Amino acid sequence: MLMQDGGDFRGSQRFAILAILFLLCSLSTSFSQPVHAVEAPYEAVEICDYVDQLEFNGTLANESVHWQTSLGPRVPGTNASEMFRNSVEENLTQWNVSMHEYTVDNLTFTNVEAVLEPVGADNNTPRVVLVAHYDTRNVAERDSDENRTNEPIIGANDGASGAAALIELARIIPPMELDYEVELLFTDAEDQNYTPHRFFGAEKWAEDQTQQEINRTAAFIVLDMIGDADLQLTHIWPGNGALWSTIPPLAEALGMVENKTDCNGEIGVKIFDQNTSIGVYDDHVPALNIGIRAIDLIDIRFGPGAQAFGGYWHTHEDTPDKVSAESLGTVGRMVELGLRSGAWLVSNSTQEEPTEPLNSSENEEDIKEEIETQTYPLFALVAALSVGMLLLFMAFLGWTIRKQS
């Protein structure tokens, strides 16, 4: 009987070890997959056929950053804010530009929408919406000078960089003669110091959309804080997985992905990392909540060696000398490549389940705005799960030994 008990004990050990190894292998396999590994409703396109056509000028975009910051802080209701809007209306002559004013919680703000439709467009024409907020923070709560924390910032990166990219895209898109609609949405009141944090402009835009407009929107892409010289773009959640799946091929084609060959046969550098996922609530969330495929292209580490939402972010150091024409050009060219190649047009033969709306209480209470962001590299998840499973096995082994004794 004792011999039999000993055999059962050794059998239990072998079974437990095999079970743990199987679980670890399964976890490692699933977490090593790219976060964008979903079946997308977007058709594959020959991206490299369009690279030689790219015209986005990072220097011109950077000049816009300098001009915007020269106006001063573009806080809603200020002359600087109005001057920016007037300039958009005066200069985007090939676009249908409209102003949309709202008042919410005693805050009056104005979105700017610029629309370019193809010849023969109707209510079913697909559209791509490119988005950037043009307002700047009304306080500098992270500034090292406590005497200036209540002063508004000029927002060269956090504000002007995304808006500058849209303005440069507005210059080069009309000659493309795309067969789908493009909307440039300049949102207001994205960065105002309210608790809980609100994305006022994006929320009102979402409220104004009809079901038909929602259905025909193929992509909603936010550009925010894209001017840092040390550009580090990652996968951002929440965000539509299918739309995210279109970004790595575009980035690889332009040499933005480490160890991947670009369209010129050169090895890319680490600018875009799809396998690191970071939680950010931004202007893309209201669009997600109404069922539009939306993502956020944002670099949340601003400045040399900065941590997530650190460095120059929300300080008076967010100045134009910290913004890089090269970084603006890198992101702008990637967006231009997506437009020219038709990467964001949805296949008529492929359908996707609607996006689940995000829980508003999670947005307001659990996340507590962007600052409480967390970064989850996949290897860290695997390591944590491996340690957890090992501890579980050790506990099981100890329990078995005690039982046998």
Image: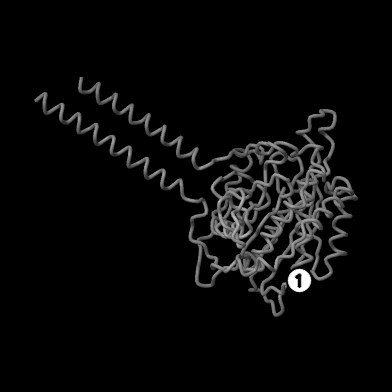
Q: Is residue 43 above or below residue 231?
A: below
Residue in view at x 74 percent, y 70 percent: 116
Image quadrant in which you'd find residue 267: bottom right
Spot the residue most to the top.
Answer: 405
| Residue name at image x 67 percent, y 43 percent | 300
* Residue projecting furthest to the front: 265
Residue lying at the far left of the rendered structure: 1
Q: Reply above or below: 345 against 284.
A: below
Q: Position of residue 49 (x, y in %)?
A: 62, 70
Q: Which residue is mark 1?
A: 174
Q: Within the image, what quadrant is residue 187 found in?
A: bottom right
Residue 296 vertical placement versus 348 (above, below): above
Depth order, front residue of 50/293: 50
Say which of 203 and 244 sits in front.
244
Is residue 77 shown left or right of residue 343? right
Q: Is residue 272 above or below residue 243?
A: above
In the image, what residue type sits under mark 1?
Answer: Pro
Camera-side residue: 351 or 361? Answer: 351
Give the quadrant of the C terminus: top left
- Asked which secondary structure carries label 1, the reply is helix
Of the pair 358 and 25, the residue shown nearer to us: 25
Q: Position of residue 50 (x, y in %)?
A: 65, 68
Return the x and y of residue 218 as percentages of the image width and height: 61, 65
Can you say which quadrant of the picture contains the N terminus?
top left
